[in-house]
Image: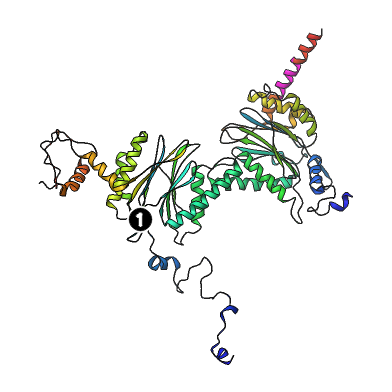
Amino acid sequence: MASRYDRAITVFSPDGHLFQVEYAQEAVKKGSTAGKEMNPSHVKVGIRGTNIVVLGVEKKSVAKLQDERTVRKICALDDHVCMAFAGLTADARVVINRARVECQSHKLTVEDPVTVEYITRFIATLKQKYTQSNGRRPFGISALIVGFDDDGIPRLYQTDPSGTYHAWKANAIGRSAKTVREFLEKNYTEDAIASDNEAIKLAIKALLEVVQSGGKNIELAIIRRNQPLKMFSAKEVELYVTEIEKEKEEAEKKKSKKSV
Amino acid sequence: MALQDVCKWQSPDTQGPSPHLPRAGGWAVPRGCDPQTFLQIHGPRLAHGTTTLAFRFRHGVIAAADTRSSCGSYVACPASCKVIPVHQHLLGTTSGTSADCATWYRVLQRELRLRELREGQLPSVASAAKLLSAMMSRYRGLDLCVATALCGWDRSGPMLFYVYSDGTRLQGDIFSVGSGSPYAYGVLDRGYRYDMSTQEAYALARCAVAHATHRDAYSGGSVDLFHVRESGWEHVSRSDACVLYMELQKLLEPEPEEDASHAHPEPATAHRAAEERELSVGPGEMTPGDSRMPAGTETV
């Protein structure tokens, strides 16, 4: 049944599915299979704190001869907005470029920087157009878009290949996103985001649930209110990871003391 | 028919629009002429006859204008409204071609309303000014004439922008537009302070427009006064310009006890004397007991 309705993007199936869009969502989960190389989609997590927004991504393992610095999964769209994506890197490049142009056009036409919601809506509208056009396939990416608006309120949005977008307090996309989301649901409390450091640690903890080999494979970016995007160096990430491990040990010691 | 063929005449309905007519939206100018120069020399003379002013101060933005619409030397309407509301927190004073101003303000209203619906909040005054100037700059060289001051209160407080139809867009504290603007600027520059009270601001605006209507032939009728506050705009008053000017002059006349030595000027020279006094002494400043007459005043 499905095979007759997934050739052309513009066709609904009898039971109301747009199969190309659903396949695109699969691509986001699984990552691309370009040639012989499997590029599994790595997990990305976004957290909205009180005065900070955090994006954490699982770092792609690079081949020996590959220059690590050229692999970037967190991209700035403007001074106050950035995004991380999961899925096809090439598709993401196109979307990010369009979004960056739109950020500047908006400033030119209207004198104000984009709100996070505006640029999310733009990206989502762009993705939706590709689900309703002849001869084109949908973008195979989901995006987490974070930033601060003029009014100083932090925002986190998620878009998917169908062109829908929602605001979130904390979310994850990519491989094992479900596990990470469940962790966040349990651990995202008012205390957890009370301070900037706590919010950062929550993001790292969430990633550590699914990322093997710890801090070396984590890339972190934050935006604080009225400050530009800050990418953490590997050392800074390590500092947080060691702090988290210390806290874990102390918590376990306390538990073992209690049980005795 | 034979005659038709000889004359090469075609019945009109078989033809499309004449190739000699300009395309829709175009101008017909003689061949070889630069359209802009041609229109500047021979084109329709546009009226800028008006006095409008706007200034921003601590308690908002004041917009004031006269109400005379002139068409050359003919007063087309003595009671027109030159201050157009755009939305609850934005007004525009208009000068130039009334039709152009009215049209472009409707377009601006539509743009801002659409953006408000899409974004969930009204664009700032800076955005509105940017949108208006961008829209009009596309028609540059086609004799659009809109000189307007956008007065509004947005997230950054009271804001004032001057927009002209060639694309000029300037932010400022005081603007006056129109043929009466030099006279208005004189009064405004003398009396403006950011920290004025609301009543002082009203008095200043009325005074400036009244003086401009007194001297400028193309300004007159009444004086409209609007105030944009944090809660929105309000129409403060519409007062007859001549009456207002007379009242302002009465305020300057000396008290009988203080200036017994002053020869009270006869009505014939009252106007000139009053103005001379104002020029040299400044509004409201009277030196009591001073028997000096300002130079050039005719004594009785």
Q: Is residue B17 among what the camera can see? A: yes
What amino acid is labelled 1 in the image?
Answer: Gly
Crowding at dot 1, Cα within 10 Å, few <14 / some 14-19 / many 20+, comes out as many
Point out the stretch of residues depicted in magenta.
A241-250
Which residue is more in the foreground, A218 or B170?
B170
Q: Is residue A7 above or below residue A73?
A: below
Residue farthest toward the right in the current orientation of the protein: A1
Q: Is residue A184 above or below residue B296?
A: above
Q: Main secondary structure of the magenta part?
A: helix
Tag count: 1
Q: Residue at x 62, y 42 (%)?
A: A118
Relative to B120, B90 lies left or right: left
Which residue is under mark 1? B49
Relative to B251, B159 lies left or right: right
The location of residue A45, given as percent across then percent down, is: 72, 33
Q: Residue at x 76, y 35 (%)?
A: A43
Q: Chain of mark 1?
A: B
